[in-house]
Image (cartoon, rainbow, N blue to C red):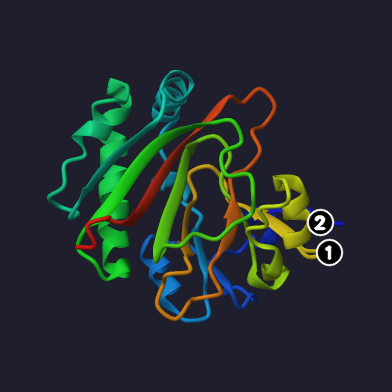
Amino acid sequence: MNTVVGLPALLPNLDAPSSSPSFDLVSSLDGLRSVLRPHLSTVVWRRPRERRLSSQVRSSLAEYAREGAGAIVVEGAPGSLSLEPIISALPQRSRSAVRTDIESLAASFAPLTGRDHVRIELSVVRGAGCRKLHVDYVGLRLLSTYVGAGTQWLEARDVCREHLGRADLDADENNELILRADGVLRETDCHDVVLFKGESFRGNGGRGAVHRSPPLAAGEQSRLLLKMDVAQCGC
């Protein structure tokens, strides 16, 4: 039987080193740099309460997630790129907090990529999103959910990689083969920050982090997802 486990149940003490060879759970934003360790493919920062968005801001973003649509993308170097296309679309009372959060995450993410420019996308995800367990053909990817459930992912030892990307199977059939018997499907919380190494990260071919979008909870219509990658210009 396969199991879905939230992070608190998996490892309550986030200051303790993970016993897993392929992922790490860290207690600070600076801790995300551990993703550069060769044996790690996934790093999760479980934000402390004081680093999470306020209830007022969360309520405002939930309203935007219900009524907004599509994705807004900006690219540039942290410190000089304009977030206005993203920020101006949000409700007024959430703008300052979201701007500060995105700027802080981008400033930490960019040095890990080895590039100066990042691609930042804020999207309203309706429906099931990427239901199939999959790897990304990128270097590093940062995800943080502002509204709705977090991202589901697998530890390397729980993956049957020979079944990844099976076009002849639907999502449920494919996922059942990818997740090993007695494997654990882990899930980040809303506001957690997760870094995934993709197949294109140097020396990581064949070891990209396996993950998927979560099923929407009962009564949930959408999620609000922040994503960061290397800018497409390759700068």
Q: Nearer the viewer, residue 167 or 50?
A: 167
Q: Is residue 13 above or below residue 226?
A: below
Q: Is residue 189 visible?
A: yes
Q: Nearer the viewer, residue 226 or 57?
A: 226
Give yes or no for contact between labels 1 and 2 (Cβ–Cβ under 8 Å).
Answer: yes
Q: Is residue 4 visible?
A: no
Residue at image position (28%, 25%) is 89
Q: Is residue 36 above or below residue 43?
A: below
In percent of width and height, residue 208 lies at 53, 68
* Few, some or many residues within 10 Å of mark 2 (<14, 14–19, 20+): few
Q: Amino acid at mark 1?
A: Ala
Q: What is the distance, in whole Å, between disc 1 and disc 2 at their CAs?
A: 6 Å
Quick one: SS at disc 2? loop
In percent of width and height, residue 225 lies at 45, 40
Q: Quadrant of the C terminus?
A: bottom left
Q: Nearer the viewer, residue 218 or 49?
A: 218
Q: Residue furthest right?
A: 1
Q: Residue furthest left?
A: 80
- Residue tagged 2: 2
Q: Amino acid at mark 2?
A: Asn
* Few, some or many residues within 10 Å of mark 1 (<14, 14–19, 20+): some
Q: Would residue 108 appear left or right of 208 to someone viewing this image? A: left
Quarter holding residue 123: top left
Residue at image position (30%, 45%) is 102
Of labels 1 and 2, earlier in sequence is 2
In percent of width and height, residue 50 lies at 41, 45
Q: Is residue 59 above or below residue 135?
A: above
- Residue tagged 1: 181
Q: Quadrant of the N terminus?
A: bottom right
Quick one: SS at disc 1? loop
Q: Would residue 157 appear left or right of 85 to someone viewing this image? A: right
Q: Would residue 142 appear left or right of 128 to someone viewing this image? A: left
